[in-house]
Amino acid sequence: MDLATLKEDLIGKGIVESLRFLAQKFDGKIVFSTSFGWEDQALTHIIFSNNIPIKVFTLETGRLFPETYYVWNRTLENYGKPIHAYYPNNVLLEEMVEKKGPSSFYESVENRKECCYIRKIEPLNRALSGNECWITGIRAEQSLNRQDMENLEWDEGHHIVKYHPIFDWTLDQVKAFIKENHIVYNTLHDKGFPSIGCAPCTRAVREGEDFRAGRWWWEDQSKKECGLHAVKS
């Protein structure tokens, strides 16, 4: 894939036009991953309301907040379009829980990464398999690690083109878009949760804390990523 040419092709195009172009370019092999957060709900609205032929999927880890399931259901009702769910491999999950218990991720970084792999990474690999373009809701200002990324890039780990349509949007822009288009969103955002993942691994962020401070808060790490969106070091 000639990424430079693809970048040139997207110059001057708006989000809807860019997504339509990519959907045509990667016909039948383009997907969008949603975790039902602010950014993902905005992009889901854009894709569904404009009937852009991009497959939307989510990772059903089995540990999501009740509020997340509510948004999932409401989104299905509002648009009448499918959101494909990818679950953990039952053999891997059962082996981990039987050996280490249901909360082993609190005990060590190694255990947490194992849980993330089983519940998120392995299902993601299946979701991306056979596809050539991956749409995400990543924004640059979400963390210092993500500022080193570009809105269109090659993901070497998954061997796929990644496009972040709202990469340059601010949080205020996302909120305004949500409000203007009456898009259902996760009410945990109003309670100090800027980033919402699995319930046992996510807490509200206190004033002055980093955007992702609420994720795996018990770990003393500078890079709090689970591996879904690996960044260049």
Image (cartoon, helix red, strand yellow):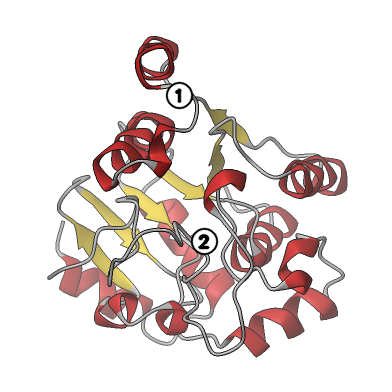
Tag shown at residue 20: 2
Under circle 2, the secondary element is: helix
Q: Which residue is drawn at 44% across and 63% down?
A: 21
Quadrant of the image occupied by residue 207: bottom right
Q: Residue at x 65, y 68 (%)?
A: 193
Image quarter in which the N terminus is found: bottom left
In this orientation, which residue lies closer to the viewer: 178 or 30?
178
Label 2 – label 1 distance at C-alpha? 31 Å
Instruction: Give the vertical position of 214 relative to 97 (above or below).
Output: below
Under circle 1, the secondary element is: loop
Query: Residue 40: x and y, percent?
Result: 60, 61
Residue found at the far front of this picture: 107
- Which residue is disc 1 drawn over? 88
Q: Residue at x 41, y 11 (%)?
A: 98
Query: Residue 130: x and y, percent?
Result: 30, 32
Query: Residue 221: x and y, percent?
Result: 28, 66
Quadrant of the image occupied by residue 50: bottom right
Specify whether residue 93 is in view: yes
Near mark 1 (Cα within 10 A), the count class, few <14, some 14-19 or many ≥20, is many
Three-letter amino acid code at the position of disc 2: Arg
Three-letter amino acid code at the position of disc 1: Pro
In this orientation, which residue lies closer to the viewer: 29 or 220?
220
Q: Which residue is drawn at 37% across and 76% down?
A: 10
